Amino acid sequence: MYIIFGCGATGNAVVDALNKAGKDILIIDKDENALSSWREQHLDVMVSDMESFDLDSQYCENANMFAILTGDSSGNLSLAKRIKEKMPNNFVLVKASGHGETQALKSNGADMILQTGNILAQKILSAFETVEMERSAFTLVNIIKESNGKELAIFLQDNPDPDAIASGLTLKRICEFCDVESSIYYGGSISHQNNKALVNLLNIDLINTKTSKEVMAVMRYAGKIALIEASIPSKNNVLPIEVTPNLIFDHHPIDISSVKGDFVDIRPEIGATATIMTKYIRQLDLKPDASLATALLYGIRTDTKEFTRNTTSDDLDAAAYLSPLVDTAIMSQLEFPPMRLETLDIIGRAIRNKEIRGSYLASFVEFISDRDALPQAAEMMLQLEGVYTVLVFGINEDKVQLSARSRDTRVNLGLILQSAFGELNSGGHATMAAGTINLGILGDANDRTSLLKVTSDAVKKKFFSAVGVEFEQETFPSDEKPQAYPA
């Protein structure tokens, strides 16, 4: 938690930036009126002067960053001194108005002093982020080293994409730095041509674990468990729901209160988990070799759609750092991998089976074995004139797989899919989301044509209802029925 004292111009600017970054904040000021606007935004506020603020409060138990930004010089000094005496390891940033104050604050342990006239909210945020990254990297290394001579098992999301694969490789590199063995595991399959090309060209060693027996065998011999590009065991990953991972890295939006782990780094404001992992190796001064740099940059590029989707300055900074280190020949091959015939067939079915309601399109591609073809079909459907939001779905084994894309700024796809199909079955960002729904007893139906019809109608109805447009139930002429494809 960040505790901010003072709601002047600087304090408000810092609070606004921290709030937009999704940080947990407590704002303290002696003036109730100064806090009213933040209270209306449902942020935690407290009316208190600095002298009477209780450092034994429950807030301070969870806080490790303090910013003292009031205009009361003597009060700032007194509070900074009290904090450093009681919590010497906590970071304290203080505003000062002159050289004399600066010297006094330094002598009393203040970690960073900003003089009036040079105070910028961005500078304060940068200081916080630097300290936070240093502490996170230190904690990460210590947890990895606690594996007690056993392997650290790195589990990726099911059907891992380049972002997940690159992030797993980076954690493996950090394990090497810590002299800890590690292996990378995944459920599902790697069928998307881009993902297969990445694994093949960089000769990446990934272990496919599809059964619970295989997963339990891995966990039995592992010292620590990591989960990457997923936050909750069993949700888009093969870990059992009762497992609590030691390490979690992700950038997908999630209710953080539902995430359990010893070390959790989830940053939905960042465009790719590979960007987060790049921050760690830079902090640990681990220069990536050409293969790792190529994987990381490719992961960032694919998840941000060549820096046109959910891209932040952190993503661009990571890309600038990695670019000179990549293998340009391999990167060129990754950009134009061959397309599988089934992928082309699924795209064709998406075009043939499309149903459009206003600017919304839904298409059922029936039975599939290549789940990774769904997002490619959704991306292609999004190029249609007048279409701004797309859902493409198909049946893979005993599940309905969903992939959605949008270029409508009024739409948040992650929330729409959760509203339509449940939080445990779907999620994602505003412009791209996905989901998996168990077929249940429908999956055992003998009549494949009926299964297709019921599935198509049910998913479309929920989707169109969630976006607020009318669903027209499809009917088939007596001499025409949908083509059934073998599972």
Image: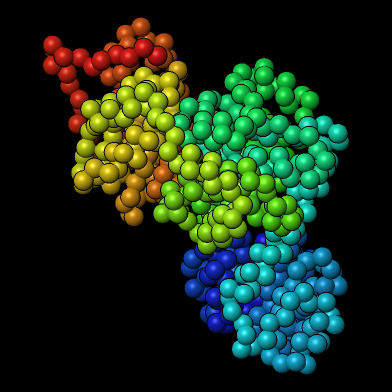
Q: Position of residue 443 (x, y in %)?
A: 41, 15
Give the quadrant of residue 373. Answer: top left
Q: Position of residue 78 (x, y in %)?
A: 79, 82
Q: Viewer-proximal residue, 486 or 19?
A: 486
- The answer to whether any part of residue 256 appears in the image is no
Q: Residue at x 41, y 10 (%)?
A: 444
Residue shown at the point (78%, 34%) measured from the top left:
181
In which quarter of the view is residue 85 placed?
bottom right
Residue 9 at x, y percent in the picture: 55, 82
Return the residue nearer the eye: 248 or 304: 304
Instruction: State how the image is colored.
Output: rainbow
Q: Quadrant of the C terminus?
A: top left
Q: Residue at x 61, y 89 (%)?
A: 117
Residue 455 placed where, x, y %?
Answer: 33, 22
- Give the side of residue 23 with respect to residue 68, left or right: left
Q: Is 215 displayed left or right of 356 in the figure?
A: right
